[in-house]
Image: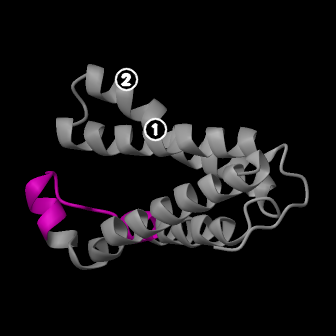
Amino acid sequence: MDTTVAATRFAKRVFTIAGIYGLIVMLPQYFLENMTSTMYPPAITHPEYYYGFIGVTVAWQVAFLTIAQDPVRYRPMMIASIIEKAGFGFAAIPLFLLGRLSVQMLGAAMIDMTLGVFFVISYVRTGSAGSVHVRG
């Protein structure tokens, strides 16, 4: 298989998995404000931040699914996607070490960091893909 075809297929799979995973994780959050307040006190005092965060995160999942449709064409958006994933991961590590973040949230951050690494690999590999477009 041509390396450009393989690189494009890899990126398609990575961004599709990331987008679907993110939607599965984030969409239910719209209905879990009370449970989140109970499980992770103190209670949410600024629901606009809570729902705003979910909305922005869901929008990014749609962006990942868009990138997956044509990774070469949308390659510049991969840079923003990498930053989106790194933002949570790099913030979570020191917060955890300072005792300000639960182990469950650290786990979620590590999933984001892992996806971010795959985004970097996708970005690098699609750089040589030029204008090759692969379906499937």
How far apart, in angstroms, are the residues tagged by discs 1 and 2? 14 Å
Outermost residue toward the bottom?
31
Q: Which residues are magenta?
A: 35-54
**Mark 1 against mark 2, which lies toward the viewer?**
1
Residue 30 x/y as whole percent = 31, 77
* Disc 1 element: helix
Q: Residue furthest left?
A: 38
SS state under label 2: helix
Q: Which mark is residue 132?
A: none
Q: What residue lies at 12% left-to-right and 67% top-to-bottom?
A: 35
Disc 1 designates what residue? 113
x then y, percent, for residue 75: 78, 55
Determine if the magenta segment contains residue 95: no
Task: Answer with left or right where residue 127 lies relative to residue 105.
Answer: right
As drawn, 58 above or below 121? below
Residue tagged 2: 94
Q: Residue at x 47, y 59 (%)?
A: 18
Closest to the observer: 24 or 16?
Answer: 16
x, y percent for residue 97: 28, 20
Query: For this rendering, which residue is in front, 57 or 122?
Result: 122
